[in-house]
Image (tube, rainbow, N blue to C red):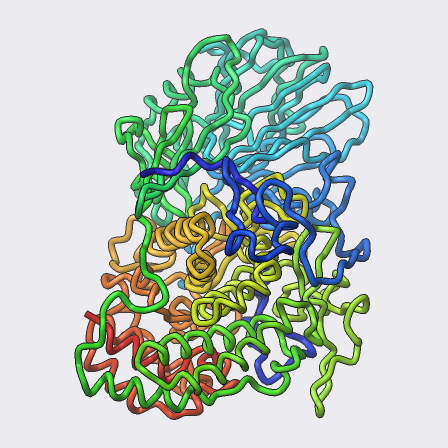
Amino acid sequence: MPSRAHEGTPLGGRQRSNYESNKSLTWRIASGLAVGIGVLTLLVGWRSIQQADIEAQQAVRLGSPGKPQMLTTVTRTPMSAPRKALWGDIKAPYPTHAFWENFVLGTGVDGNNAVTGLPYILQASESSVDLFYPYTNMATKTQYQLGFDQVVGRLSIGCATYESSIHVVDEYSDLGVTLKHDFGKDGTMKTHVVQGSPYVSYEFDGASPMLTSGQILRAFRVDGKKAACNAKGHTGSLFEFSLLQFDETWRVYAFPPIKLVCTASNPPMALQADDPYTGVLRVALSNNCTYGEAQHHCSGNGHGSYVPSHPNGYGGLLDNHASAMVTGGDVEYSFDGNKANVNFKWRVTSLNKSSVPALMLAMPHSVEMMKDQDSIIDGVAIHRSIHGVQKPVVGNTWEMTETLSDIAYLAPREIKDKDMLKAVKQAAEEDIDWELPWNYQSGTGDPYNAGKMLAKMANIALIADHVGVSKKKIDKFLDNLASGLEVWVNGTSSNALVYDKSWGGVVSCGCKYSYPPPKCLNGGPPNCPALGGDPVSNGFDFGNGAYNDHHFHYGYMIYAAGGLAKLRPSWAKKHAPMVLSLVRDIANPSSDDAYFPKFRHTDWYAGHSWAGGVAMAYLNGRNQESVSEAFNAWYGVSLWGRAINDSEIRDVGRLLAAMEKRGGQTYWQIPKMNSEIYPEEFAEHRTAGIIWSNLIQYQTWFGQLQWEVQGIQTLPVTPASEFLLSKDWTPKAASLFETTCGGSCDTDGWITFLCLLQAITDKSKGWECAMKLDPHVFAGEAAGGNGNSLTNTLYWIATRP
């Protein structure tokens, strides 16, 4: 029976450097790189764990979740705390991975504070919110980007006369944000930035609008009629202007009509109101190839460009739906067995009291999910980004479906080959004695590698239990797993996890590592070197203190907790509230949770997570490297829900995993050369390494070799990985992996993932590869293979169809 639609009840970017902490496991950073979402609504809450068995759980259940238990609370220094001046009246917890995060990082107005809100790129200033229309470009053979000119290409919309006013976040929703400029006696301006909106809406209250462009004016029309740009005023509801350098035509819709003066010198083009205006201007690009001269946009030019030569039909669409102003959007979901219904409910305001529905733009993965394919308007799309063509969709609600995986702790099939089964059991008998490195037993290491190795232990235990290793051996191993996990979830590790009151989240304190014996010279909180906000601080623990990669780090730990709870339910009863703090940090579905933001990493419109946090604003926006580790995080959440018999947590984990899988297979995995997303120059790599808001790179944070890219988009391999790793993609990915795997690919354990990939389409080849592995590839100091084991490798291969 389907569950009710969810209106979230509370759950009660990896930077590849890791200064001072366990330097033998430090990732290499690729030269010249920088580090780099929204959400749901639940009517029912997370059910308590084991009902009323845990009295402490009452503080973190249902509608009034409590403070994260067992963790020290810290307040950040001003350098690393949110800049309150940019947040207005909004209080913590704050989003840390929203698509618009650059609006509130640093000064909020410098050259790097660009926000990619497709189909545009936007930037705020003290008097305006400016638009850029980007173009796709193969900058190099390994970098596919959205280019934009920050000088000539800038279209600035703001107030003509104003007192200097920094923007503030007025409100935000799952799919958009509203900025507000208060110009004092000169009125106010609100800017509604919504993902997928072909219009950017500017709401003026007693302010005098002004629009300027660095391009030369080529043609000017008012209400469909040619008009002179001669410093005289024109009153109208529709202003249209064509610009020379980028061959663009823009339309400005006014509700109510407005009088604007057009000038065509210094800057080359300006539209300005002499009088204060109260109303809405909606600005939209109507043609990116007006005269067929745009190098980047017109058909046949540029890299992967796609537009009709004369998209008059698209302009008509803009006209027909301009009165339906979208100011934000909410995501709702419900479950029906192994299906999820996901709805985008756009916040629509009619500007002329009509029932005209909204016009929005859908990315490729959303088009696949839509129930009503008739709402998609074919043949008039003009917007293409590095993420593919955005198709126009008419409707105030997008109704979509997603298929969920039902894979749990083990593979969905048994080992049929007796020799393989014997080898798996023999490996498990040996791996069951594996121990965490000393520095991770005390928690002086970093949470990322700690999580990987704890997840490895849980995985070994689950397989060992399944293939018949003695209970006595497994119990001893579980004791070690529990001890290693508890130092983190209880906040007692030397590199302690703490609750950050300033942003709202669980972060690592950081460890100024010393050895021997392993210890943290800083002594733990409140002396937290990872929270200083400077570049060195942001390098601790792969940037955990700056909210990089929390879903990677805590996803591994949550997976480990789910495996441990499955085999030892009594552990879950005691430690459930602490594990829930980690779950809430990365997968909280409710705006009513006073301690954590809604789905920290999830960008529902983009169709995947973002990993990069709040260290600083980067011109390329948000980023994520390993989609497979993001997928693993949500798989871990689903396992925790299964282990504690909580279907809500389980299904939210399954939904997020399904979303990440679709995003991964659409944007990271490139199975064929004639890709609908990528030009051939990039498609030949078959895999994206790092995806940013406006840049896609074939490389990792630690290198540019093929095996590095293929490996980071494969690990970790668990029973659920067969849901993610497409059979159409893996043969070519494995081939590229194999041709370059030598040196540190072998010694650091990345070769193990080559064996696992090969087995998907050639079981015998994968087995042969695995049987040649040196035991060292699974050692704690093996940066790639330390989260894997021979037991898991052989089990995965043996259970392939």
Residue 492 vertical position relative to residue 582 in the rendered view, above or below: below
User: What residue lies at 42% left-to-right and 18% top-to-bottom?
Assistant: 321
Instruction: Count the marks.
Output: 0
Residue 445 versus residue 206 in the image, above or below: below
Please tell me which residue is depicted at 36% across the width and 66% down the height of the picture: 409
Q: In this orientation, does residue 17 appear?
A: no
Residue 614 position, x and y percent, is 65, 54
Q: The N terminus is located in which quarter?
A: top left
Query: Which quarter of the image is occupied by the C terminus?
Result: bottom left
Placement of 117 over or under 252, stated as above or below: below
Q: Residue at x 32, y 90 (%)?
A: 426
| Coordinates of residue 161 in the picture (x, y in percent) | 76, 21
Give the camera-side residue of 302 and 74. Answer: 74
- Quarter location, residue 661: bottom left
In the displayed image of the protein, which residue is found farthest to the front?
53
Q: Please indicate whether residue 669 sits to the left or right of residue 474 in the image.
A: left
Q: Looking at the image, is 713 positioned above or below residue 61? A: below
Nearer to the camera, 659 or 690: 659
Task: Say which residue appears at 50% left-offset and 33% top-offset.
Answer: 330
Residue 515 shows in the view: yes
Position of residue 351 measured from the top left corner of the image (x, y, whole percent): 53, 13
Q: Is residue 134 left or right of residue 724?
A: right
In the image, residue 27 lies at what x, y percent? Answer: 56, 76
